[in-house]
Every structure is written in structure tokens, then in C-alpha cells.
């Protein structure tokens, strides 16, 4: 397979066309951004870790019946994925209070929620990814009711599978963001699942092992990403 023109460069990844129909290549960078691009930096080796980890987790999810865009890992930083039309929604699931939820509701970080919650943000950098609900998404034509229901069902399934999987590695899955795409007549999991897109805490000490170390200048960012990588046996 040959990598052709770059289609898109995002904050953490580049996406390339290929000479194979229906296949794109994703190339993971070490660039890190936070607060809608206001804070910029580099997390050395992050691209390699996120590529490997995301691919591994997508394969775990596939085995549990969640369809994903993953096809094949091509190199340390490159993966072949199915071409999808990304649905411009950030789908966020939370098991514990943290981040924007904690701030918005004045609830201390780390409180276990009585049920897992789901929220949507509309993916638009200029607007700062505003939080919307299912009615907004349908009203502005982002997704149909059937798609929203399928996305929600898949997101909760991802949570159940990954919560258990991370717990077996001594990691609490506090919250995470996922994205979905349309592929043929199916909705599949796309984008990535990594310490950039999840809050991962040590299950006993609650030490942060994710991008909050970069966002909040907590230090040892690379060490935390490597620790998760190691605990997953990668
Ligand atoms: O900031 P907030 O608490 O809303 O983030 C919830 C979860 O979504 C966190 O795991 C965070 O890493 C992830 N997220 C993301 N990309 C964004 C916003 C949030 O991966 N643009």
C-alpha cells in the first residue's frame, strides 16, 4: 500500500490518502495541545504510545463486538484505517467527577458517579467545541435519532469493556472521549483512545496517568504515558 496526499493535519495526527480504495493511513505526532490549542507542547514518544495503545484497545473492543476503523498497524506511528465520514461529535463518558464536569457542577474530582454519564460536544474549533444535547445534534443535522441511539449504545459498551480492562491493569477509567464515523451503512468507532483522550488514574493512589499532567503542568508526562503502556503489557 502506498501513502498518497495528506488529507488533513490535526493537533495530534495526520491523515493520508492511499492507493487502496476505502483505506486511509493515520500518522501519530508527538505534538500536544490543550485548552482548544491555546497551550502547545511536545510529549516525546507520545505518537508511538498512542498509536500502539489505540490499536490495541480497538482490537480488544472488536473482540467484544464493537466495530472500529482499525485495519492494520503499519509502523510505530502509522496505522491503516477504514475511510469514514467523521460525525462531528465528541462523545464523552464519565465514571467519576473530573475536569469540566467537576468545575461546572462544583463537585470534587474523584467522586464516583451513581451512573456513568454521557455528553456530546459539537466538534468546532472556532466555537470551542460547545456542549450540546441529542436534540441539538439532530436539529442541526449532525446525526439522526437512530444514529444518536446507536452512538450512545456503543459508547456505553466501550465504557463497560474498557473499565474492566483498565481495572485489570490497576487503572481507573475516570472518563474518556471517543468519536464515531459513518462507514458504508454502519457507524464505527474512529479516531483514537489513548492517554490524550482518557483520564486514567492509578486505581489505588489516584495518581494521574494521562494528559492532565500536561494540561496542569504536573510534570513527568512522558513517564505517565509510559507507565500506562507498560501496565497494558505493550
Ligand atoms: O475536559 P473534560 O472534563 O470535559 O474532558 C472529559 C474527557 O474527554 C477527558 O478524558 C478528556 O481527556 C477528553 N477530551 C478529549 N478531547 C477534547 C475534550 C475532552 O479527549 N477536546
Image: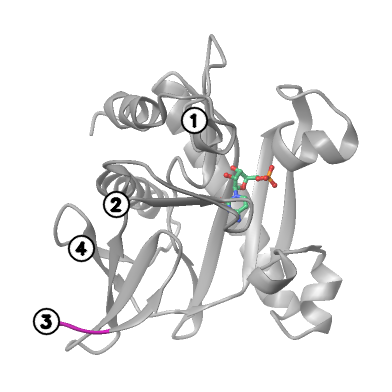
Left or right of 122 on screen, residue 162: left
Residues drawn in magenta: 1-5
Q: Nearer the viewer, mark 3 or mark 4?
A: 3
Please tell me whether mark 1 sits on a helix, a strand or a loop.
Answer: helix
Residue at screen point 48% across, 33% down: 210
Q: Nearer the viewer, mark 2 or mark 4?
A: 2
Mark 3 — residue? Answer: 2
Calculate the distance from the C-alpha at mark 4 to the C-alpha at mark 1. 25 Å
Sequence order check, earlier mark of 4 and 1: 4
Q: Is mark 3 within 8 Å of ligand 1?
A: no
Along the line of sight, the residue nearer the viewer: 154 or 10 = 10
Along the line of sight, the residue nearer the viewer: 207 or 61 = 207
Which disc, if any, is residue 13?
Answer: none
Instruction: Give coordinates of residue 111: x percent, y percent.
Output: 76, 22
Calculate the distance from the C-alpha at mark 2 to the C-alpha at mark 3. 19 Å
Please tell me whether mark 4 sits on a helix, a strand or a loop.
Answer: strand
Residue at screen point 64% across, 68% down: 89
Mark 1 — residue? Answer: 164
Sequence order check, earlier mark of 2 and 3: 3
Left or right of 84 on screen, residue 177: right
Calculate the distance from the C-alpha at mark 3 to the C-alpha at mark 1. 38 Å
Mark 2 — residue? Answer: 51
**What is the count of numbered marks?**
4
Calculate the distance from the C-alpha at mark 2 to the C-alpha at mark 1. 21 Å
Please tell me whether mark 2 sits on a helix, a strand or a loop.
Answer: helix
Q: Is mark 1 within 8 Å of ligand 1?
A: no
Position above or below: 98 against 182: above
Instruction: Give coordinates of residue 171: x percent, y percent.
Output: 47, 23
Which disc, if any, is residue 72?
Answer: 4
Amino acid at each position: 500500500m502506498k501513502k498518497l496526499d495528506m488529507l488533513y493535519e490535526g493537533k495530534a495526527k495526520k491523515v493520508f490518502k492511499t492507493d487502496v480504495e476505502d483505506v486511509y493511513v493515520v500518522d501519530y505526532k508527538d505534538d500536544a495541545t490543550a485548552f482548544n490549542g491555546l497551550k502547545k507542547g511536545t510529549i516525546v514518544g507520545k505518537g508511538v504510545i498512542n498509536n500502539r495503545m489505540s490499536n490495541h484497545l480497538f482490537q480488544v473492543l472488536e473482540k467484544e463486538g464493537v466495530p472500529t476503523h482499525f485495519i492494520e498497524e503499519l509502523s510505530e506511528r502509522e496505522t491503516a484505517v477504514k475511510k469514514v465520514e467523521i460525525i462531528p461529535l465528541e462523545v464523552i463518558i464519565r465514571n467519576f467527577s473530573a475536569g469540566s464536569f467537576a468545575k461546572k457542577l462544583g463537585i470534587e474530582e474523584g467522586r464516583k458517579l451513581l451512573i456513568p454519564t454521557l455528553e456530546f460536544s459539537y466538534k468546532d474549533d472556532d466555537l470551542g467545541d460547545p456542549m450540546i444535547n441529542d436534540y441539538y445534534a439532530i436539529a442541526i443535522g449532525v446525526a439522526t435519532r437512530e444514529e444518536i441511539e446507536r452512538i450512545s449504545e456503543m459508547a456505553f459498551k466501550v465504557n463497560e469493556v474498557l473499565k474492566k480492562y483498565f481495572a485489570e491493569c490497576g487503572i481507573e477509567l475516570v472518563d474518556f472521549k471517543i468519536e464515531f464515523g459513518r462507514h458504508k451503512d454502519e457507524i464505527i468507532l474512529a479516531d483514537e483512545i489513548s492517554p490524550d483522550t482518557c483520564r486514567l488514574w492509578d486505581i489505588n493512589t489516584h495518581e494521574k496517568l494521562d494528559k492532565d499532567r500536561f494540561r496542569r503542568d504536573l510534570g513527568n508526562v512522558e513517564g505517565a504515558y509510559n507507565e500506562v503502556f507498560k501496565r497494558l503489557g505493550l
